[in-house]
Amino acid sequence: MSTIDVLEQPAGVAERRSRLAGVLGLSREAKIGVVILAVLFLAGLLAPWIAPYGQNQLNFTDIYAPPSWAHLMGTDGAGRDVFSRTLFALRLDLAIVLLVTYPPLVLGVFVGAVAGYFGGIYDATLARIVDVTIAMPFMVLVIAVIAIVGPGVKGILIGVPLVAWALYARLARSEMLVLREQPFMLATVALGYSTPRTILRHAVPNLMRSSLIYSTLDMVANLLLLSGLAYLGLGAQPPNAELGSIIADGQSAMLTAWWVSTLPGLVVVLFGVGALLLGDGLSDGKLRGALQ
Amino acid sequence: MLSYLIRRLALAVVVLFGLLVATFFIIHLVPGDPVRIVLAGRASPATIARVRHQLGLDRPLWTQFWLYLSHTLRGNFGTSFTLDSPVAQIIGQRLGVSAALIAYGMLLSILIGVPLAIIAALRPNTWLDNSIRLGTTLTFALPGFWLGLMLALIFGLKLGWFPVAGYSGGIVGILQTLTLPALALGLGLAGVVVRTLRSSMLEVLQSEHIEATRSRGMSELRIVGRHALRLSVMATATILSINIGFLIGGTVVLEQVFQLPGLGSLLVEAVEKRDYQLVQALTLLAGAAVVLASLATDVVQAFLDPRVRLSGR
């Protein structure tokens, strides 16, 4: 897939490019995924500057206006521009998704690597903790945390990482079990490298790849969870909008104003398709089983 | 066999104990005094003290945990703060709806997923396989509640085939009120079924013993009927049990979408009213359901497939 691109480059560059290609993936599927994600992340990042209206700008003379050039996604029951609200919601949701996906990834890979490297009692203990953590239905656990700390983003920022690290730990641990038997890992012992150096500099970079690929699926799962919670009214509280809460707002008027619930939902789907294409392209579909 | 079962059972007990510990702390992690928060402004200090005593919150933590453990194991989940009746009784009244929804959703995911997986595995890398794969990618990305809303909009509001809210029992009632939510729940899972089953079926169809059967002149149809389907029963059972947590999470939101009186909507109500006792019991129940489902699948598999019990996990 990427060989032709690489061959056209001068030697030194080609090597660097192919390493980059290994990380970024250059299959057509993955490229489409990157473009979709880039557009959505940019849209969220630039929301305050590109949104045509304020996210809570009311206009009672123009309620439930269908999509038009003035209102790309129509307006809702308070005359608010759904497109602008969606952009701001996307900004908030994507920021939360990044926050609940990547810090747990780092923690999980580290914990899994250490447990896998030392084995024995550390490994057994971690395996049990991971079992308990994963046994909780994710949604229910996050809702339980929200019950404790109250509705809002805080509950999500605490609840999701509480579980999310465990999958990465399991992934990194099982790879570490294979990795630590590799000749180059044995060589680090022979060379007298310290254990932290062995784990952090020589093992972890090798464990990162599959976790990073898995994280594309995790982002989708987290965005779906997030919008589900916002739909239930347990996410960001008004006046802040989340994609799920915009969808919930539109539910009562679905027959007369289908656009309020439908279009923000399509944005969620678009993000999911983008991330899954990227993940699929990176892994050649191999990691799909990890979603379960 | 016996040693495998004992080890597997011991693991389940450890995980269940972990769940008990985790859920025990739900009430204790609430910042401030949970009783005061719930009864704020509605109760005298004397009442608050009485409720605290009833809940055992005035005793040492160890005693509290011991009481929680022994009560829970005897099926006593305490009394709901807000509904003023035993938690076990409230849950019992609403369990049926959620169970029916999950079972119906699973059934639909099998009815949709298994045939598609077989078709995709028989014609790998053709346009048919590719479009099925594209379809499953899409179902992964669909928020279940949004899919539910869209189904309600099209088949409920526009076409008027199904009601969009409420629940009624009996086979006819379930078919009427649960078909749309079960479809929203089952479609997401059907994607997982297709993906997993397709790849394991491809593996079997390309294996040597199937090649041997082929060379003996057995028709492709019989090969699929005898080998692929047998495989798919086991694989699907595993997929469904692994995803029971996902299904439970899905019902929480879908029950809200279709206003079904199940455990999911009960959980959301409990959170809104800050009924910690109820949240605690529901969380425990959901976790236990996942643990028991995976235990049951592993045990059944050990009976059916000697490789499982001999692999010495």
Image (cartoon, coloured by chain):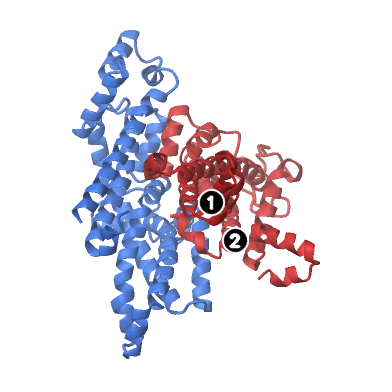
Chain represented in red: A
Badge 1 element:
helix
Residue toward you, A42 or B19: B19
State the residue at coordinates (35%, 46%): B260
Residue B8 seen from this side: yes
Considering only vertical position in the picture, is B130 above or below B270? below
A40 relative position to B130: left or right: right
Q: Which residue in the protein does label 2 denote?
A: A282
Q: For the residue carrying disc 2, how many other residues have a C-alpha within 10 Å: few (<14), some (14-19), or many (20+)?
A: many
Which quadrant is the N terminus of chain B positioned in? bottom left
Residue type marked 2: Leu
A207 relative position to B306: left or right: right
Q: Tag 2, which chain?
A: A
Whether the residues at callouts 2 and 1 have beta carbons within 8 Å, the answer is no
- Determine the colour of chain B: blue
Residue toward you, A16 or B220: A16
Residue B116: image quadrant is bottom left
Q: Nearer the viewer, mark 2 or mark 1?
A: 1
A188 relative position to B287: left or right: right
Considering only vertical position in the picture, is B127 above or below B178? below
Q: Position of residue B302 (x, y in %)?
A: 25, 59
Q: Which residue in the protein does label 1 denote?
A: A186
Badge 2 element:
helix
Q: Position of residue A292 (x, y in %)?
A: 43, 55
A10 relative position to B171: left or right: right
State the residue at coordinates (39%, 27%): B274
Mark 2 or 1, nearer chain start: 1
Q: Position of residue B91 (x, y in %)?
A: 27, 38
State the residue at coordinates (50%, 39%): A161
